[in-house]
Amino acid sequence: MTGERPPPRIMMVVGEPSGDFLGGQIMAALKRLTGGKVEITGVGGPAMEAEGLNSLYSIADTSVMGFNEVVPKIPKILRRVREAADFAIETKPDLVVLIDSPDFTHRIGRRLSKRAPELTVVKYVAPQVWASRPGRAKKLAEFVDYLLCLLPFEPPFFESYGLDTRFVGHPVIERMETGDGDGFRARHGIPADAKLLAVLPGSRSNEVRMILPVFKDAAGRLAAGTEDLHTVIVTLGHVKDKVAAGAGDWPTPLAVVGQDEKHDAFAAANVALAASGTVSTELALARVPMVIAYKIGWFTYALFRGLVEVPFISLVNLIEKRGVIPELVQEDCSGRDIAEEAHELLGSKAAAKRQVEGCQAALAAMGLGETPPSERAAQALLDIIEEKTASAR
């Protein structure tokens, strides 16, 4: 009589809070799909620990950004790479899942490829090498066995480099919430018939420094041609002081709010100005017409301009292969040009509707309306284990 099959054993490794959030979602999905019969080990933060992970060490050791912060921690980061890889070699899980943080997790993958090539390595969140230096995909294939992708156009690209690739959908789809726009306006004294401009100047200090003054100029130009215009700036705690300093003498009545009011602010807004990033997809999900802008220092721009090989910076436009959302980058990122695009969206219901409806096909391609991406990712991991087991019989 054949005994019951042992539960799948999966080691997951993240390097920073964003990866921890993704890992926590996948852990919850794995437990649902297996009825709790799954063993998960590895490295995570509060989200994964809340799902039962006993992390090998704190991700505070590896969650660092910027030259001045990274350099002093290099010895500790390299030690954590060795610890995670050695734990995998010792425990021999069915899968080692490396989540995001390529600068950290890829080092673990390369170490495993050299010291334990028999282990199966899965990378979750394909690095955006298709945007610049696509040859790096070939190097990824040297230490990754399976790749879980967020975007529908990624599998053909990575498969051309010999990677077994599975599309699972974008996790931002699971962040969709219905905000209380009326309640937000009431809390902040914004009349029901006033136009509300949402401003999202980025999550990094240098983004706020470069982009917020341009958005402020655009808001002033919009206010000159729009009766009773109000503004809400949605920001994060670690850049809130810089945002507050840059928002002095704002040209319209202004509210500055944190992430806890983000979805309510989106529900209340008529149009948004946003720095390029995941927030553009969140705004599309909230059906807020927007203008996307981005600006970096000229030296950095000159350094990287020749490496970029895609025509757009927002996911909606990349997926649709056309400019559904206006993008104003670098020399085009001016208050005048941004205000001109936003003015059309504020003044023309037809223009706003065209953009909102144009985003829906891209969102559907990212997984909206289907099985949640975290569950698709979890199922992909279980399928890989099943395929391995079947081929070994």
Image (cartoon, helix red, strand yellow):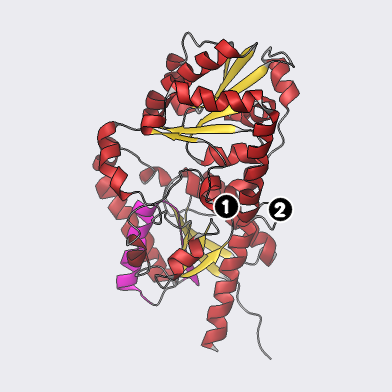
CA separation in Å, label 2 and label 1:
12 Å
Asked if residue 114 is positioned above or below residue 365 in the image, the reply reads below
Q: Which mark is drawn over residue 259? A: none
Dots 2, 1 in contact, CB < 8 A:
no
Which residues are drawn in magenta?
Answer: 93-117
Q: Position of residue 37 (x, y in %)?
A: 65, 67
Asked if residue 317 is positioned above or below residue 279 in the image, the reply reads below
Q: Position of residue 27 (x, y in %)?
A: 59, 57
How many residues crowd around disc 2 within 10 Å: few (fewer than 14), some, or many (20 or more)? few
Q: Nearer the viewer, residue 218 or 254?
A: 218
Residue 60 visible (yes or no): yes
Which residue position is annotated with label 1?
170
Q: Quadrant of the C terminus?
A: bottom right
- Residue for point 35% across, 68% down: 112
- Residue for point 36% across, 45% down: 61
- Residue for point 64% across, 44% down: 358
Which residue position is annotated with label 2?
369
